[in-house]
Image (spheres, coloured by chain):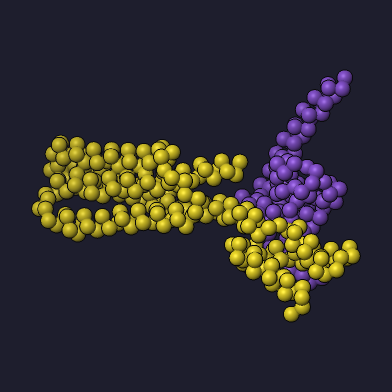
Amino acid sequence: MSDLEQSIADWRRQMLAAGIKSPVPLEELEIHLRDEIEREKKSGLDEPTAFQAAVQQIGKANMLNNEFEKVDGIKEFGAWRLIQIILFAGLGVISLFITACVIFKLGSFSEISSSQQMSGLTAVAVMILLAGGGYLGHGFFPIILNKRMRDVICLSSGVLMVIWWAVFFNIILPRFAFTTSQLGATLLWGFAAPFGAFAGFVAGLGKAWRKNSTMASS
Amino acid sequence: MHSVAMIRKELVAASAEPLVLSLLSKGESYGYAIIQEVKARSEGRLNWTDGMLYPVLHRMEHRGLIKSRWGESETGRKRKYYSLKKDGKLAMEKHHEHWTLVHGVLSGLKKEHYV
């Protein structure tokens, strides 16, 4: 390997270490570096000096990585947002379905009493308040800039919710001999209200970060 | 985009997108050529830190303003070529409108100043 190729290989390693991804955008940057080295050589510089000049011109690895991370953030934000919308819409529809059954005494819920209806509706109100409150109260959430950390926290809260659902459906519900009508309100408390807490938490955390990143990039 | 010389970095950053869009409206190009042309046209006063162009290009591509393809130069070197999309053309026209407005206001004020 020539000295220049060795220097370029070292430069690539520094870029990778700073977090620049390969092949894109590292390959594109390397092509640029080679073009610039060629131009510097044509202008009369020797190879090592041309390499140093080109490296300086292309910019510091950390600075470049910060900019690329912002672009990745925008892309991931789009995909993550879609997943959130699908997930929340799906769970929201299930909660609404149970709510409709309770309100309109549909199907097995025809025997439901008005106090049970009220209890069920309170659970739905709690769900909406928790979800909306989390979103609107994003100012109270910490701003977690590290995406992986944010994902881990959101995922953990999702896992906690699923564990609660598993315990609720498999352990708590079978212990009580609920009539179908009692089941409606209980379901809303056990299923929908925790979902509201989860939705509010994820929405608040996301909004807190988004608000901060919008301000940072403006 | 960071300036190392004459023009303030904020202005260099703000002008990056309209400049890239306007250059690409003449036909497809690649990062290195875009930078060289901007430097030549500004007589070196718009001096970008070269690498910073790529996040700008990638962001514009993600926003659907430009598209890219891998190709080869005449010398056989692999290159990523960027070209303008329809939305990019619209964005460019908007930029021209806004910059012309700012320029017009500034020129008008300057004239009044010297009257």
Instruction: Tell me residue A123's x, y (percent).
Output: 24, 41
Instruction: Tell me residue A39's x, y (percent).
Output: 84, 63
In the image, residue A135 sits, relative to residue A150, either above or below, namely: above
Q: Residue furthest top?
A: B115
Instruction: Tell me residue A24's x, y (percent).
Output: 63, 64
In the image, residue B78 sits, relative to residue A94, either above or below, namely: below
Identified at 26% across, 49% down, the residue is A191
Q: From where the camera sits, is residue A1 visible?
A: yes
Identified at 40% across, 48% down, the residue is A202
Q: From where the camera sits, is residue B15 visible?
A: no
Which one is in front, A175 or A59?
A59
Which one is in front, A129 or B97?
A129
B99 to the left or right of A14: right
Quarter that holds the C terminus of chain B: top right
A84 to the left or right of A47: left
Instruction: Tell me residue B46's x, y (percent).
Output: 79, 47
Q: Quadrant of residue A168?
A: bottom left
Which one is in front, A37 or B39?
A37
Identified at 32% across, 45% down, the residue is A196
Q: The chain drawn purple is chain what?
A: B
B79 to the left or right of A139: right
Q: How many marks?
A: 0
Q: The chain drawn yellow is chain what?
A: A
Q: Residue furthest right?
A: A44
